[in-house]
């Protein structure tokens, strides 16, 4: 059985041969085991649905299983996972997939199973992985085409799930096994995507994935519209009528069809706009059919037969007769599952807009009551909330919104929970107190605190702050002091999350002032714990230590284990050793155990994060990774993967992979993370930008600059500062590099004082360009200019020294900071007096703790210094070692700089390990490297910014020069001849 809507394709497909060919090719490749995805965009009515109908019909004819999910416009709030719930319903209806479905019970909650359970073990990620596994299993039974329509209306959870599925390479299996036979087609209205539309950043990420193609449907040429109009009409049409339709349709196929359908209304009956055309068609059916269509428009794009019957209250025969008329006039389309769909969303919008206000409110109320009477459970609460709100029945809308928020929380959809809670807050003041829900929804301040927690869990830190500020404003002068204190320290904690340190310190101070320290209370202990964090971030270590010791004693007296753990973490470094020391980490492990006993996931994750960072800062990179993995697993079990500490752990995990030189693993992990990260978590994949820049990706700088847009984010600013400083230095723009260091350090220091740790790295990166400029001027005989840049170099090295002398966890910085300081000192010496071998040897040794790439960059500088000192053999050896690392990492710009040095210094003549003479050009070597990674011609073209055809020519040249019969053989020969360095997995 092929699951595809049996919709009659009533209109011919004209003018879309190229686009249909592209989709047909994708389907063919998918059936052959090359899974692909296509994002289909275009203005409303341009023909997206018609093209998808044709493509799905062809897929069905070719034996593919077709599963279709629709996104629905429910106003400001969404129904979590709606299109995927529809897809699951289709899977459940097909007996072929019973066994596959049984293997993934976690997805049953989307069909209403276990809907009252809170997602904990695995959280959203487990649900996503279950859906991925289910679709993979379905594709194993038969080739699968997954269609998701109207993404512009998708809820955030559906967008996240689609992003997750596509980022998994459309469920691509390892190369050793057969790939899944799967294609994904997803459509959206491009004219609905305003600047701040939430789908925009998702699309920007998806189109960078190698398995995703973009297909934009542009307006049809006038000649094609004319062909379409004539093909739609059985008899001849006056030329003037055709010209008029073509002119007014402006290339929109749907406009053309509607204009043609309304052309028989008589002189003067033709409307001046599309909505009028649609309404004329509605007015041409019987009064009963018009009532049916208008009622259906209130339900949305689609409506179930039974729901429509219950709302209208018509006898069955009369309703069926009216529906038959509406379907016959192509106002509605009969679909599977006893549903009816408006032939186009614009038709529904026009009908809905024509309703009188009272009529609209009455019908919304009828739908809400019927949905409630049918007892469809919390999964339909979002629909009921929408209908009650539009019917102005605010008490019922408030109750349904709170119920929908609870359902969203249980299925792991914090963004939807937040929107439902905010909708409830918007209605709060308009609902009489006696008609407000009892219990959790009975207190507005408590509701705002709950919404702020949902915002934090969804990664919307600034929204969490705004909601807590609103809660603070809602507290009266006579409010309970403990509640007032709790709101203030909650606000302080949220402010710390968005790096508003001064404000956090002020509010935590106010919280402490509101309640006495004696006798100790739980509220005072947590207010004090928050104040300790704020004081420490502000650099007030005396206050942090004094209040922290007092609060820790109180927490022990009260037996508040999670507060004890939190305070032990804050006091680490202030007393008992920093997190970089074994003593400090033992204290953090103790705190972690206390938090575990208390069942406090947030505090436990904080402890695990601090342990992992301590390992990184002490140079124990391999030891760091298990702690990060444990912290992320704890976050998954608690459903808190989007909260602050797990976000920073994701960044740290990628940073360790980047530092160790495991760049491909870093990029893969970043792609997987990006699929589930909130929009505010862009910084978490920052190390992948470091990889992109080092590999010569021209887009890395622009992607980093995007992190500076929107509200201030400390880590986002840090990542952008590193990438943009390094990018400026790499292109030789010393002025831009120095200015970026100054602005980044000033921004990161604002309101805190002192110098951020990252300043030592930023200074070292900028010093590279400054030293290059000073050397250039010195060689040109411009001593004054060289001295001026020497002064700039001195300013930067002093900044590096200040940052390396201390750290926010105790002086001085660890191995990483000292290595960057050594590099900064070596660059400063080069800028002021010239290259110094000893300084660069110290820098190379400094990065020996595990930073593979930076050690190679320092080796290049060492080779330059050795060459100046006429120590050619040693220079050749250093250059050879650096080149081997650059080749292994795919760091093309660094490799090219090393090759230039070897040629300029004639280091190859020394017999240095510069590799065998290659018969390939530099561009062919780039193509060969990507061939070794299994890239297709199209993917090679995208990465090297050439066309797929040009890439194909390079591949053919490589095969000819190496005497290879296939791409695989060419790679094997290249490894054997030493043209690609060591094969993956080869021993050192």
Image (cartoon, rainbow, N blue to C red):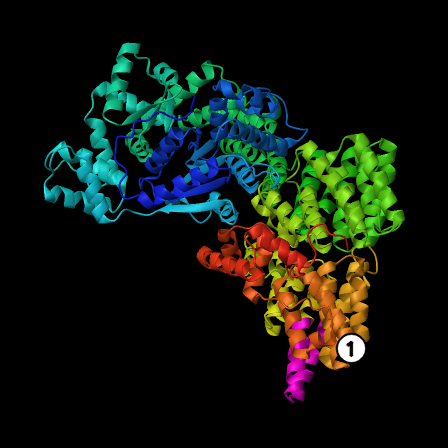
Number of callouts in the render?
1
Residue 371, image x, y percentages: 44, 18
Report if residue 282 lies within the magenta region: no
- Residue 782, compared with residue 348, is above or below; it is below
Q: Position of residue 395 (x, y in %)?
A: 48, 24
As helix, strand or loop, the secondary structure at mark 1 comes to loop
Q: Quadrant of residue 148?
A: top left
Q: Is residue 195 left or right of residue 281?
A: right
Q: Dividing the image into 4 quarters, which one contains the N terminus?
A: top left
Instruction: Name which residue lies at 83% across and 61% down.
Output: 812
**Predominant SS of the magenta segment:** helix
Q: Which residue is mark 1?
A: 836
Q: Is residue 580 left or right of residue 943?
A: right
Residue 937: x %, y % from top left: 50, 53
Q: Quadrant of the C terminus?
A: bottom right
- Residue 775 lies in the magenta stretch: yes
Q: Nearer the viewer, residue 903 or 720?
A: 903
Q: Nearer the viewer, residue 6 or 639?
A: 6
Farthest-out residue, bottom: 781
Whether residue 445 can be seen here: no
Nearer-the-camera pick, 300 or 660? 660
Q: Which residues are magenta?
A: 768-797
**Is residue 841 placed above or below 588 in the rendered structure?**
below
Left or right: residue 291 versus residue 380 is left
- Judging depth in this view, the residue of 893 and 354 nearest the camera is 893
Q: Label 1 neighbourhood size at 10 Å, few (<14), some (14-19), many (20+)?
A: some
User: Can you give x and y, in whole percent of width and height, for residue 975 in the image?
Assistant: 66, 56
Above or below, 890 against 205 in this view is below
């Amino acid at each position: 059985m092929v699951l595809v809507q049996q919709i009659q394709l009533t209109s011919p497909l004209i003018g879309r041969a190229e686009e249909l060919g592209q989709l047909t090719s994708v389907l063919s490749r998918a059936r052959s085991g090359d899974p692909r995805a296509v994002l289909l965009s275009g203005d409303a009515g341009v023909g997206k649905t018609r093209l998808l109908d044709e493509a799905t019909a062809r897929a069905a004819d070719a034996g593919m299983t077709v599963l279709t999910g629709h996104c629905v416009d429910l106003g400001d709030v969404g129904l979590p996972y709606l299109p995927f719930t529809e897809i699951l319903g289709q899977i459940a209806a097909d007996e072929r997939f019973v066994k596959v479905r049984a293997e993934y019970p976690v997805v049953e909650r989307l069909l209403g199973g276990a809907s009252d359970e809170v997602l904990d073990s695995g959280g959203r990620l487990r649900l996503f992985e279950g859906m991925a596994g289910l679709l993979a299993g379905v594709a194993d039974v038969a080739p699968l085409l997954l269609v998701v329509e109207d993404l512009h209306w998708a809820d955030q959870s559906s967008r996240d799930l689609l992003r997750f599925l596509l980022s998994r390479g459309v469920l691509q299996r390892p190369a050793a096994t057969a790939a899944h036979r799967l294609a994904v087609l997803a459509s959206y209205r491009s004219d609905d995507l305003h600047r701040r539309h939430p789908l925009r950043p998702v699309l920007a990420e998806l189109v960078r994935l190698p398995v995703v193609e973009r297909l934009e449907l542009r307006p049809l040429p006038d000649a094609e519209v004319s062909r379409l109009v004539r093909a739609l009409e059985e008899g001849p049409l006056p030329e003037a009528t055709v010209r008029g339709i073509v002119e007014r349709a402006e290339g929109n196929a749907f406009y053309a069809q509607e204009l043609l359908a309304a052309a028989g209304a008589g002189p003067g009956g033709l409307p001046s706009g599309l909505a009028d055309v649609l309404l004329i068609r509605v007015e041409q059916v019987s009064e009963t059919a018009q009532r049916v269509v208008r009622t259906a428009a209130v339900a949305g794009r689609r409506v179930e037969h039974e729901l429509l019957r219950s709302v209208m209250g018509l006898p069955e025969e009369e309703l069926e007769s009216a529906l038959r008329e509406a379907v016959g006039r192509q106002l509605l389309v009969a679909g599977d599952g006893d549903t009816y769909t408006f032939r186009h969303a614009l038709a529904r919008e026009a009908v809905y807009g024509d309703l009188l206000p009272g009529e609209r409110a009455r019908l919304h109320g009828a739908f809400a009551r019927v949905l409630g009477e049918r007892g469809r459970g919390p999964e339909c609460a979002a629909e009921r909330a929408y209908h009650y709100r539009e019917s102005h029945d605010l008490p019922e809308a408030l109750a349904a919104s709170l119920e929908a928020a609870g359902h969203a929380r249980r299925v792991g959809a914090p963004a939807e929970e937040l929107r439902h809670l905010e909708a409830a807050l918007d209605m709060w003041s308009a609902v009489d107190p006696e008609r407000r829900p009892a219990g959790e929804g009975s207190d507005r301040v408590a509701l705002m605190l709950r919404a702020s927690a949902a915002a934090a869990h969804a990664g919307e830190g600034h929204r969490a702050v705004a909601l807590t500020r609103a809660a603070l404003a809602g507290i009266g002068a006579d409010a309970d002091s403990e509640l007032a204190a709790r709101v203030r320290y909650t606000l302080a904690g949220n402010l710390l999350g968005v790096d508003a340190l001064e404000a956090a310190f002020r509010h935590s101070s106010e919280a402490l002032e509101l309640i006495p320290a004696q006798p100790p209370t739980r509220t005072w202990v947590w207010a004090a714990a928050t104040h300790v964090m704020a004081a420490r971030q502000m650099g007030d270590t005396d206050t942090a230590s004094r209040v922290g010791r007092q609060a820790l004693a109180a927490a022990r007296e009260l037996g508040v284990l999670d507060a004890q753990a939190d305070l032990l973490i804050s006091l680490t470094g202030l007393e008992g050793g920093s997190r970089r020391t074994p003593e400090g980490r033992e204290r953090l492990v103790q705190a972690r155990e206390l938090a575990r006993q208390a069942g406090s996931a947030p505090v436990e994750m904080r402890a695990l994060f601090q342990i992992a960072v301590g390992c990184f800062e002490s140079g124990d990179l391999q030891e760091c990774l298990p702690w990060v993995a444990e912290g992320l697993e704890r976050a998954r079990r608690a459903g808190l993967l989007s909260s602050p500490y797990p976000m920073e752990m994701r960044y740290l995990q990628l940073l360790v992979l980047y530092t160790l030189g495991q760049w491909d693993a870093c990029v893969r992990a970043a792609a997987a993370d990006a699929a589930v990260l909130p929009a505010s978590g862009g910084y978490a994949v920052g190390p992948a930008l470091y990889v992109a820049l080092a590999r010569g990706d021209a887009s890395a700088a622009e992607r980093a600059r995007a992190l500076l847009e929107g509200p201030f984010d400390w880590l986002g600013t840090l990542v952008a500062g590193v990438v943009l400083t390094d990018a400026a230095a790499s292109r030789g723009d010393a002025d831009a590099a120095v200015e970026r260091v100054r602005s980044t350090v000033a921004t990161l220091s604002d309101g805190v004082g002192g110098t951020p740790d990252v300043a030592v790295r930023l200074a070292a990166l900028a010093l590279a360009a400054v030293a290059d400029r000073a050397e250039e001027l010195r060689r040109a005989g411009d001593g004054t200019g060289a001295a001026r840049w020497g002064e700039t170099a001195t300013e930067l090295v002093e900044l590096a020294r200040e940052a390396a002398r201390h750290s926010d966890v105790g002086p001085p910085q660890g191995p990483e900071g000292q290595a960057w300081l050594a590099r900064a000192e070596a660059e400063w010496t080069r800028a002021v007096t010239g290259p110094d071998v000893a300084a660069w040897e110290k820098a190379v040794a400094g990065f020996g703790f595990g930073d593979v790439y930076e050690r190679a960059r320092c080796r290049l500088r060492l080779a330059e210094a050795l060459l100046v000192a006429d120590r050619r053999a040693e220079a050749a050896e250093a250059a050879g070692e650096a080149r081997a690392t650059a080749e292994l990492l795919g760091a093309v710009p660094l490799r090219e700089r090393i090759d230039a040095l070897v040629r300029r210094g004639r280091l190859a003549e020394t017999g240095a390990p510069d590799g065998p003479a290659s018969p390939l050009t530099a561009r062919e070597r780039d193509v060969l490297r990507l061939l070794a990674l299994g890239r297709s011609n199209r993917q090679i073209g995208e990465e090297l910014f050439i066309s797929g055809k040009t890439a194909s020519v390079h591949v053919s040249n490589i095969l000819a020069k190496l005497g290879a019969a296939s791409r695989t053989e060419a790679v094997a020969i290249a490894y054997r001849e030493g043209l690609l360095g060591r094969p993956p997995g080869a021993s050192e």
